Amino acid sequence: MGEQHLTTNQGAPVDNRNSRAAGQREPALTETNHLVEQPEPFDRDRIAERVVHTRGAGARGVFVAERSMAAHTKAHFVQNAGQETPVFVRFSTVIRGQDSRETIREPRGFAVKFYTQEGHYDIVGSHLPVFDVRDAIKLPDKARTLASSPDTSLRTPSRYWEFMTLSPESTHLLAWLFSNDGTPANYRQMNGFGVYAVQWINAEGKSTYVKYHWKSKQGVVNFTAAEAAGTQARDGNHAIRDLYAAIELGSFPQWELYVQLLPPEAGDALPFDPLDATKTWPEDRLPPVKIGTMTLNWNPISYFTEVERSVFAPDTLVPGIGLPEARLPKGEKTDDFSQAGERYRTLPEAERDGLVRNLIGELRQVPQQTQLRAACNFFRADVQFGLRLAEGLGIDLGEYMQRSQ
């Protein structure tokens, strides 16, 4: 090999330490191509911050199918047991910016890109199994309520809670978010969910509705509010640091992928619309089926290029996987409260106490009318849940119920 040297974009050798000038102590010559080329990568070494899912961590790995799903989908990457597919995963917080702490109470993005032989396939989801609004038209308004207030540039809980209490379908998500599940200890020890149902299509054209579940083989570990505050005081980057260190040390995190399968014609038997993302599918009626395991074993070499520039979209699909047709929920299937009540009742007593305590702490910062709507929504989910919340806020629900009769 000949002597190695730096070149311009056109391949000509270049001195990268000295500019060509008109003379000693004279201005640099802008006619020099390299003087123009050199700052370009530096000037462009930023991308506009994402509106949501700004702060993230990522890693590469492999998904290994453990059974053939050919009976339900013709997607190539799940046709045969033992088939390996490269993946890239991006975990993220949702609303806050790049300088935010990783202990904040919000859903965590859990997005997986499969590099299949038929193209890329994205499973875009969350570490919580449900979404907070039913109709996508509400998303921009919800995001604005979580952003900084325009007058003070500070986060204002009253804006968020006014929106959420006027969107009663959010009650289920709030019962998850304000429990310990709203503050996962790290990215390795949390589950992931596709949240939205997709449609699998087999070689004969038969369709099946599917929901994805990523189950952490490391187990699930969450912070209490006090533990989250303690960690935040010590390290605002603990989750990124934890994921990177585990992979560097060879302790490769793994998630098992399960699917719930629902024939479209069986959806009418459920007490809710199966395509409503504010609902979970009952596992006793639709037991999750394990289809493979994902292992993350390769840290990014360039965080900016691999993690920050990564893009995921629900409509990044491959043959055999599609989006379900739009359905309008039937009037009798828009129960916004039952699953929130079930969620509350299935929590251990100490975690129920923490859920109520966290909600009271947040709602003390909002106007009384908003507090009342929140207490009424949680009362509809579970009487004890609503009464405990009202008592902690100093609200007499009995007086309100008498007036509403």
Image: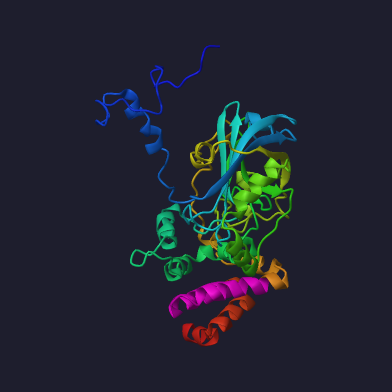
Q: Quadrant of residue 321?
A: top right
Quadrant showing the N terminus:
top right
- Magenta segment main secondary structure: helix
Percent position (x, y) of residue 262? 65, 46
Position of residue 250 in the picture relative to residue 401 (left or right) = right
Most foreground residue, 38 or 22: 22
Please report the bounds of the magenta region as a residue range.
Answer: 352-379
Q: Residue at x 62, y 31 (%)?
A: 75
Query: In the image, is residue 66 part of the stretch drawn in magenta?
Result: no
Q: Residue at x 50, y 77 (%)?
A: 364
Percent position (x, y) of residue 401? 52, 83
Q: Residue at x 57, y 82 (%)?
A: 392
The reply to whether residue 52 is in sight is yes
Name the residue at the top extreme.
1
Give the mark count: 0
From the viewer's perspective, is residue 235 above or below residue 72? below
Query: In the image, is residue 359 part of the stretch drawn in magenta?
Result: yes
Most foreground residue, 391 or 206: 391
Percent position (x, y) of residue 299? 62, 39
Name the residue at the front extreme.
24
Q: Residue at x 68, y 70 (%)?
A: 351
The reply to whether residue 260 is in sight is no
Position of residue 30 in the picture relative to residue 62 (left or right) = left
Position of residue 7 in the picture relative to residue 250 (left or right) = left
